[in-house]
Image (cartoon, grey):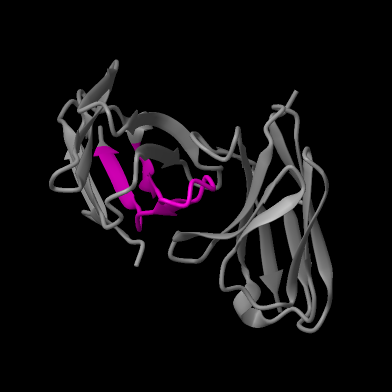
Amino acid sequence: GENVEQHPSTLSVQEGDSAVIKCTYSDSASNYFPWYKQELGKRPQLIIDIRSNVGEKKDQRIAVTLNKTAKHFSLHITETQPEDSAVYFCAASVSSNTGKLIFGQGTTLQVKP
Amino acid sequence: DTAVSQTPKYLVTQMGNDKSIKCEQNLGHDTMYWYKQDSKKFLKIMFSYNNKELIINETVPNRFSPKSPDKAHLNLHINSLELGDSAVYFCASSQEGRGALYFGPGTRLTVL
């Protein structure tokens, strides 16, 4: 069935270090992979997304890579700052083209000053 | 000028009661969703409407009934509330049912 596995569930880094969160999806027809950041008590907000015809996308300190063959995609945050502390969710579209997204379990990132 | 709004933000009620949550988006999107976020932060889709037509109906108890009066509004009515219904409910919208989801601020439902 449709499934997205996300690792790690928690990640603690020092300010200035890099953070990497990895996801694996099961539906080979998935073609859209967004990443969301959710601060405590707030709504999930889109931070970056990638479509299946692209292998990598970068926006300032964040980047996403996609390996369609292995059905893996990853979020990379460089030069982390305390305000990057939040829960991060990956997601993958499903083949029904209804806009349905399957979310990963979330990664709680803590950036220590 | 809020893009996706929900009311109420907090809802505390007794078991067995019936309650509704309202959602509105002013982004001009044609697809709207209800997601449930449980205590472990897991986000799970419940329903989706495209131009007032129900297109996603996940395995959700029939005590939950969505209604979309027009493509800018999606409401959720819950009958006979149970303790396990306690969660944060997020409304979201997207264009053409593809691409980025824009979430509302969430409604924290607590059933006592």
Q: Is residue A66 left or right of residue A96?
A: left
- In the rendered image, the quadrant that contains the C terminus of chain B is bottom right
Image quadrant in which you'd find residue B111? bottom right
Q: Is residue A80 left or right of residue B35?
A: left
Q: Is residue A80 above or below residue A99?
A: above
Q: Residue at x 73, y 56 (%)?
A: B10
Q: Residue at x 40, y 53 (%)?
A: A103
Image quadrant in which you'd find residue B79? bottom right
Count of numbered labels shown in the rendering = 0
Q: Residue at x 56, y 73 (%)?
A: B59
Image quadrant in which you'd find residue B55? bottom right
Query: Does any portion of residue A21 appear in the rendered image?
Result: no
Q: Is residue A109 left or right of residue A16?
A: right
| Image: magenta residue range | A85-111
| Foreground pick, A106 / B95 | B95
Q: Residue A101 in the image: state x and y as whole percent.
A: 46, 49
Query: Does any portion of residue A64 appear in the rendered image?
Result: yes
Residue A107 part of the magenta-drawn span? yes
Residue A74 part of the magenta-drawn span? no
Q: Residue B65 in the image: state x and y as whole percent.
A: 76, 67
Q: Is residue B18 above or below residue B94?
A: below
Q: Residue A94 in the image: state x and y as whole percent.
A: 41, 51
Q: Is residue B103 left or right of residue A112?
A: right
- In the rendered image, the quadrant that contains the N terminus of chain B is top right
| Foreground pick, B4 / A18 | B4
Q: Residue at x 50, y 50 (%)?
A: A100
